[in-house]
Each structure stands twice: as structure tokens, then as C-alpha cells.
Amino acid sequence: MKFEVWSEEEIGKKIGEEIIELIHRKENAVLGLATGSSPTCVYRYLTEAYRERRVSFAKVTTFNLDEYIGLSPDHPQSYRSFMNRHLFDCVDIDLKNTHLPSIRDGEDAYLHYDKRIEEAGNIDYQILGIGSNGHIAFNEPGTPFDSLTHIVYLKESTISDNARFFASRDEVPVSAVSMGLSSILKAKKIVLIALGKKKKEAIRRLYEDDPSVDLPASALKYHKDVTIYCDPDAASGILSKVKDYARV
Ligand code: GLP
């Protein structure tokens, strides 16, 4: 696991360029995408590159990590509408090739999500954010490392963290469908973005501690190609210990 420290803009550029390079190499690349404020720097970079005609998403397939239960796809805070707004509606991707896990097509539709990813050839490049309690996707502390896509009941801390996107805390859904930790570890390459002081403690634990279900992101230590991109605030608990990082 590699740690790098850059400004948010630089992180967007570095990951964006890697994705562009991947699509140039493999036009039907499979991307694993995340929502939240952290990955928007990447989506801004990719949208701009598309406008400059440096990349086309026409043959690309995407799988998102998670989706709330109980919000319709056109609700402004559903992850479907987040993705449409921040990326899909801004580039030439075919919406038919964009997937989010859901229970809408039947109570057990989410059970087929891992199979669909496998049939698409598995994820070439997975983007992750991290929750302040160390969750990735909606895999809350305690989630087994061998979990596949499943229904999740959100922790109070996650509901509070995400309340900023809703008119009130009561409107935040209490459950979601999420890819599991094992689903995520099947991606060929993984990058995690952590921005801001609120992520400092999770990043410190990720850097210092052995893998444990108490910190879901620590499952990534079992993957051979993971880079953790932090801004200086998120990295402030480890800066003195990380030897191999770029100062901004
Ligand atoms: C939500 C999402 C996660 C995301 C996390 C952090 O809980 N399900 O995938 O990583 O929020 O979000 P942010 O990047 O806004 O801090």
C-alpha cells in the first residue's frame, strides 16, 4: 500500500490521467466509481478532458460502489443522480453501461451485482473515498473482509456525516446496498482519496495498524496495487512517518 500527499487538484489530475491512459489502452475499460465529495476532483478533471476531446467514454462500463435504499433514482441525493450530475451527463458514456447496486429490480437484485461485475471482466480501476470511521463504500466497522454486495444498516456516525447533503438528519436513509470488501478487493487496481482533517484519524489508523474489521479500509492491505491519495490535512497524522511522499 502506497501513501501519497498532494493537493486536491493534483489528486484529481493524477487519478484522472491514469484513467485516461487506461481508456486509451483499453477502450472498453471497466471503472469502479465512488460518490461523496472526495472523488469529485477526478470527475471534474475527466469532464474537462472529455470537453478537450482527449478521451471518450463511449465504450466504458462503470459500477458504482453503493446506493441508498429508499431514494428514487431522480432524488437529488441518490447516488444515481449524483453520478449523472458529476460525470455521466457531462461525457459520452452510454447510461446503459453505468450500474449502481439496488433493490429496485427485485428484493434480491443486489445479489447479482458481483456476478455482473465478473461478467463485465472485473473492475480495472476502482476509486474509493473513506468515511471518518474508516468505512469504504458503505462497509461499516465490523463488516467481514469476505463480504460481497449486501444490504447495510448505516451507523449513526455515517448518518451524521452524510446529513450535510440533506435538508435534515431525519431525511438521510438508514440503509443502503453496498459492494462488499471482497467485491472491492477483486478490482485490478485501487485508489483511495482522503481529503480534510475529518479523515486524519482514519488515515493514521490505516497507516499504522494491522488489518482489522474495526477499520474496513484496512482490508485494502490484502491487495497488491493500492495507492492512498491524501491532502495535507488528511495526512497530518502520518506526515512525519511517511518517507515516500511528495510535499505540496
Ligand atoms: C459515503 C459513501 C462512501 C464515501 C464516504 C465519504 O458514506 N458511501 O463511499 O467514501 O461517504 O464521503 P466524502 O468523500 O464526502 O467524505
Image: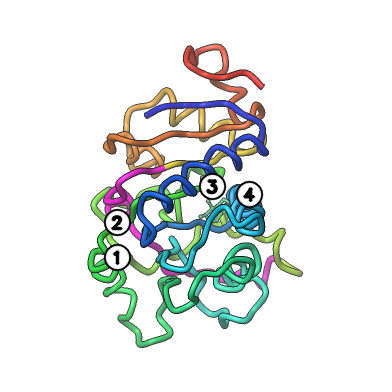
Q: Earlier in the sequence, mark 2 or mark 4?
A: 4
Specify the label residue 45 is tagged with. 4
Horizontal side of 188 relative to 41 (left or right) equals left
- The total number of labels drawn is 4
Q: Residue furthest right?
A: 167
Mark identifier at residue 55: none
Position of residue 147 relative to residue 19, above or below, is: below
Q: Is residue 161 magenta?
A: no
Q: Nearer the viewer, mark 3 or mark 4?
A: 4
Callout in the foreground (2, 3): 2
Q: Which residues are magenta?
A: 169-190
What residue lies at 41% left-to-right and 41% top-to-bottom? 217
Q: Which quadrant of the figure contains the N terminus?
A: top left
Q: Earlier in the sequence, mark 2 or mark 3?
A: 3
Which of marks 4 and 3 precedes in the sequence? 4
Residue 193, located in which quarter of the rendered image? top right
Q: Are marks 4 and 1 in contact (CB under 8 Å)?
A: no
The residue that label 3 is drawn on is 131
Q: Looking at the picture, does residue 228 appear above or below residue 35?
A: above
Which comes before the other along the chain, label 4 or label 1? 4
Q: Nearer the viewer, mark 2 or mark 4?
A: 4
Q: Earlier in the sequence, mark 2 or mark 1?
A: 1
In three-dimensional space, the C-alpha distance between marks 2 and 1, rounded to whole angstroms, equals 9 Å
